Image (tube, rainbow, N blue to C red):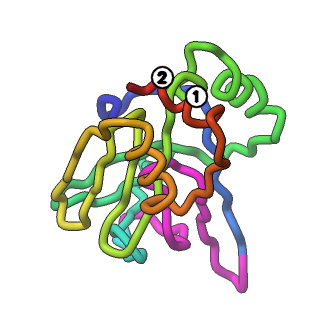
C-alpha cells in the first residue's frame, strides 16, 4: 500500500528458474498477494494464475511485478537481475523478525489464498478479498472468535492452554 514508485529496502527474495530453455519466476512468500503459480519471465505478457492475473513490466533496468485486482493493475514490487546472495538479506530480515517496531513482531499477520478469494488477518481485522475486487472486512470481537478463524479459515492448529489465549488477548 505504498505510493507508486516508492523505493524500499531489499527484503524480499524471488527465484529465477531456467528450465528446458525457458526462464520462469517463482515467488512463494509475498504475503497477501503471494504468487499462486509460476510466471514465465516475459515482460508485457498478462499471465493467468489460479487466482489473479499477473504481469511483468520492464522499466529501464528494473522490472515491476504487477497483479490485477478487480480492474486495476497494482505494482507489488520492483526487482532487477543483479545477483543477490543470502547475506544481502541478513540485516533487513533480522530487523523484520526482531526489532520491537517491526510489524512482524508487534502484530498478528496471517494470509491464505483460497478458491476465488484471498483471506488476510491483521490484528483482529479479518479481510476477504474476492477476485472481482469486492472486499469484505470485519473486526473480530474476542479471543474465541480469533482462535476460531485461525483454525477454520487459515487451517492453523493452535495449542490449547491459557498461554496462547493470554497472548492473543493483546489484540482486544
Q: Residue at x 61, y 70 (%)?
A: 24
Q: Residue at x 68, y 21 (%)?
A: 95
Dot 2 lies on which element? Answer: helix
Q: Residues within 10 Å of mark 2 (few under 14, many from 20)?
A: few
Give the x, y percent position of residue 132. 18, 66
Q: Residue at x 20, y 53 (%)?
A: 135
Specify start and end residues of the magenta stretch as a single range: 19-44
Q: Are marks 2 and 1 in contact (CB under 8 Å)?
A: yes
Give the x, y percent position of residue 20. 72, 85
Position of 4 with respect to 24 (left or right) is: left
Q: Nearer the viewer, residue 107 or 145?
A: 145
Q: Which residue occupies the extreme bottom position in the image?
A: 20
Position of 84 with respect to 55 (left or right) is: right
Report the quarter where the C terminus lies.
top left
Q: Residues within 10 Å of mark 1 (few under 14, many from 20)?
A: few
Residue 7 is covered by the magenta coloring: no
Where 126 falls versus 94 (above or below)? below
Residue 31 is covered by the magenta coloring: yes
Q: Which mark is residue 167?
A: 1
Where 127 falls versus 53 (above or below)? above
Position of 85 with respect to 32 (left or right) is: right
Q: Which residue occupies the extreme top position in the image?
A: 100
Q: Which mark is residue 170?
A: 2
Measured Cα–Cα span from mark 2 to mark 1: 6 Å
Q: Residue at x 72, y 79 (%)?
A: 19
Give the x, y percent position of residue 65. 44, 53
Give the x, y percent position of residue 6. 39, 27
Amino acid at each position: 500500500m505504498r505510493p507508486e514508485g516508492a523505493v524500499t529496502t531489499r527484503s524480499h527474495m524471488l527465484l529465477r528458474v531456467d528450465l528446458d530453455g525457458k526462464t520462469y519466476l517463482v515467488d512463494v512468500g509475498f504475503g497477501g498477494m503471494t504468487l499462486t503459480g509460476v510466471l514465465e519471465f516475459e515482460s508485457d505478457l498478462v499471465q493467468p494464475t489460479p487466482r489473479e492475473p499477473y504481469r511483468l513490466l520492464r522499466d529501464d533496468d528494473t522490472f515491476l511485478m504487477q497483479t490485477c485486482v478487480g480492474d486495476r493493475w497494482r505494482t507489488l514490487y520492483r526487482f532487477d537481475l543483479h545477483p543477490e546472495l543470502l547475506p544481502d538479506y541478513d540485516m533487513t530480515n533480522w530487523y523484520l523478525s526482531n526489532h520491537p517496531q517491526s510489524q512482524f513482531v508487534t502484530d498478528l499477520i496471517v494470509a491464505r489464498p483460497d478458491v476465488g478469494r484471498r483471506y488476510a488477518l491483521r490484528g483482529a481485522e479479518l479481510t476477504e478479498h474476492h477476485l472481482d475486487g469486492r472486499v469484505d472486512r470485519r473486526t473480530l470481537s474476542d479471543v474465541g472468535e480469533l482462535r476460531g478463524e485461525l483454525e477454520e479459515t487459515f487451517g492453523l492448529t493452535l495449542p490449547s492452554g491459557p498461554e496462547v489465549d493470554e497472548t492473543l488477548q493483546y489484540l482486544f
